[in-house]
C-alpha cells in the first residue's frame, strides 16, 4: 500500500524509482497501482514526473 499523504508519497515513489525501478511505468506495473491517481495527487502537490531523471520533481 502506498502512502496517502502527498509528500510521503513523493518520498516513497522517488526512493523506489531511485533504488529499484528504471521508470515510473515499471513501478506502476510491478506494484499494480493507479498511475493516474498517483500523478494527479502529486500534480496537485506541485510535482511532475521527469523521465530523464526518473523522479518526480517540483513543477517550474
Image (cartoon, rainbow, N blue to C red):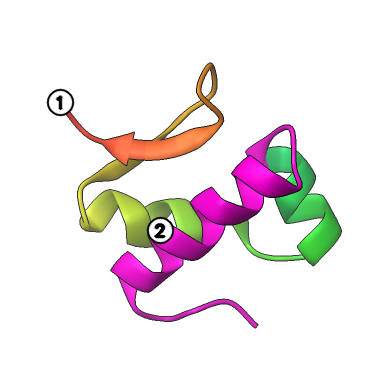
Q: In the drawing, does residue 28 fall left or right of residue 8?
A: right
**Residue in the picture at 44% in, 51% down:** 39
Residue lying furthest top: 52
Q: Which residue is mark 1?
A: 60
Q: Main secondary structure of the magenta part?
A: helix
**Residue in the picture at 69% in, 65% down:** 33
Q: Position of residue 3 (x, y in %)?
A: 48, 79
Residue 48: within the magenta? no
Q: In the drawing, does residue 9 fall left or right of residue 34?
A: left
Residue 55 higher or lower than 7, as above or below: above
Q: Marks 2 and 1, Cα distance to the nearest angstrom?
A: 17 Å
Residue lying furthest left: 60
Q: Which residue is mark 2?
A: 10
Residue 2 higher or lower than 46, as above or below: below
Chain-order first, disc 2 or disc 1: 2
Q: Residues within 10 Å of mark 1 (few under 14, many from 20)?
A: few
**Residue in the picture at 71% in, 40% down:** 25
Q: Residues within 10 Å of mark 2 (few under 14, many from 20)?
A: many
Residue span colored magenta: 1-24
Amino acid at each position: 500500500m502506498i502512502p496517502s499523504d502527498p509528500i510521503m508519497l513523493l518520498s516513497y515513489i522517488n526512493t523506489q524509482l531511485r533504488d529499484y525501478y528504471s521508470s515510473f511505468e515499471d513501478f506502476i506495473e510491478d506494484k499494480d497501482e493507479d498511475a493516474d491517481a498517483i500523478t494527479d495527487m502529486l500534480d496537485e502537490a506541485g510535482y511532475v514526473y521527469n523521465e530523464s531523471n526518473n523522479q518526480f520533481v517540483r513543477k517550474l
